Image (cartoon, rainbow, N blue to C red):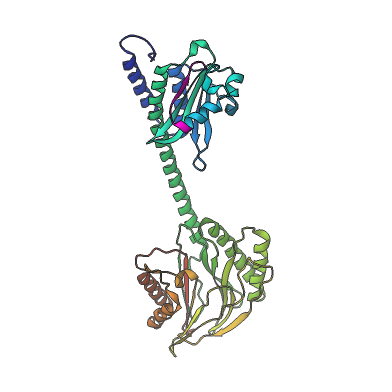
Amino acid sequence: MTDPTSSGPGPKLAHLATLYEITRTLNSSLDLDEVLHNIMDRVIEVTGAERGFLMLCDDQQGELEFQVARGIDRSDLASPAFQVSTTIIREVKQSRKALLTDNAQYDERFQRGESIMVLGLRSILCVPILVKDRFIGLVYVDNRLHAGLFNEEHRDLLTAFASQAGVAIENARLYQVAVEKGRMEKELQMAKDIQRGLLPRELPALPGYEIAADWRSAREVAGDFYDCFELNGDKLGLVVADVSDKGAPAALFMAVARSLIRGTAITAATPEEALQRANLTILTDTQSGMFVTVYYAIIEPGGKLTGVNAGHNRPLHYHTRAGTHEFLPRGGRPLGWFETLPVKALPIQLDPGDILVFYTDGLTESENVRGEPYGEDRLVEAVRAAAALPAAGVMDAITRSVTAFMGAAPPFDDTTLVVLRYTGQV
């Protein structure tokens, strides 16, 4: 490569040719690590420096961190923090201007720089890396040999080079962010698919009943869940639950809670025992600080149910023949708070046509663009208007009612809805 400091009519032309070659090389890759190493290799090549260091600002505190430390033979240098002049680095960061000294040992600006004296540095060149006037890092080179003195040509070339390097670094960073975002989106979609797979693919049947369920996440994954499973004696277990947090942590906690509740429900003698045992296991095996509200119902032939509420929303019981309604009592407290779980089973008798609606607070607390909540009253009216329909029709009517009420407002919480209708027909 042409020496940018050579005399004669062509130094500026050589300068431009060198810069063009550097730019072409830098733009040949979008791998950030490769770009950084290319930058440092080219810097040493065009300056003839004994050593070179490239530092970038971190994203959080804006502190400079070493990315590449190279010797003239392209070998990596160990412990770079102890081999540079912190005085010069600090000055360039603050001033955002290139700094050149060809007599560092006696330069009055750096007489207090102990590292310059200890390392025996003679010539130092440090150039900021700026992107649209934003300081993102710097390039630092030095020499201890008299023959390796830097001059203004080196400074000008390295300054122009740093500008191109900044663009290459930002492009590589943006590409890295895009790749990471794509990977995260793919993983979150996989997590959502896995989570959806934990929910019942098909709801088990029990003569005389219709069951319909809907599950929607406000984010990629959710903390809500429902479950329905067979129990001994021609019974069904029905669970609707809501984890206190949102996003990925809640999704992981949801998977644990769902498995524990189902496992204890199948083996426990009573529904209270099922939730109490699950609560103790959650407290023992998880240290997240999260909790989960649960409504657990055991469904039996003949319209008989036994419900246990552990801090969950009150299910709606709509008496279709009479056209009246009631909300079942709220009771107990969520699983994951305390070792004792004071829950009490409530017997429920359904008449033919009666409807039970189980839901999470994401439904009744859904807001419209004015910040008004959907509320329990609108839920009652939606069920009243669709009471003659099968369970799936009632569920769809509730969903449409909530969607129409929200309008353009985005959902802020997960929503789970389960509709149980007793037909009385066996």
Q: Residue at x 45, y 59 (%)?
A: 219
Magenta region, residue range = 94-103
Q: Quadrant of residue 160?
A: top left
Relative to the observer, which residue lies in front, 386 or 44?
Answer: 44
Closer to us: 195 or 206: 195
Can residue 213 be seen in this snapshot? no
Residue 255 rendering spot, x and y as whole percentages: 56, 60
Q: Is residue 349 above or below residue 51?
A: below
Q: Nearer the viewer, residue 352 or 165?
A: 165
Q: Position of residue 377 (x, y in %)?
A: 43, 80
Please tell me which residue is depicted at 62% across the width and 60% down the height of the picture.
289
Vertical side of 195 occupied by 312: above or below: below
Measured along the vertical axis of the image, is residue 402 above or below residue 249? Answer: below
Is 254 on the left or on the right of 13, as rendered? right
Report if residue 11 is visible in the image. yes
Residue 100 counted in the magenta span: yes
Q: Is residue 159 magenta?
A: no
Judge from the rendering whether residue 83 lies leftward or rightward of residue 217; answer left or right.
Answer: right
Placement of the N terminus among the 4 image quadrants: top left
Q: Position of residue 243 (x, y in %)?
A: 55, 64
Q: Position of residue 369 (x, y in %)?
A: 37, 67
In the displayed image of the protein, which residue is found farthest to the front? 108
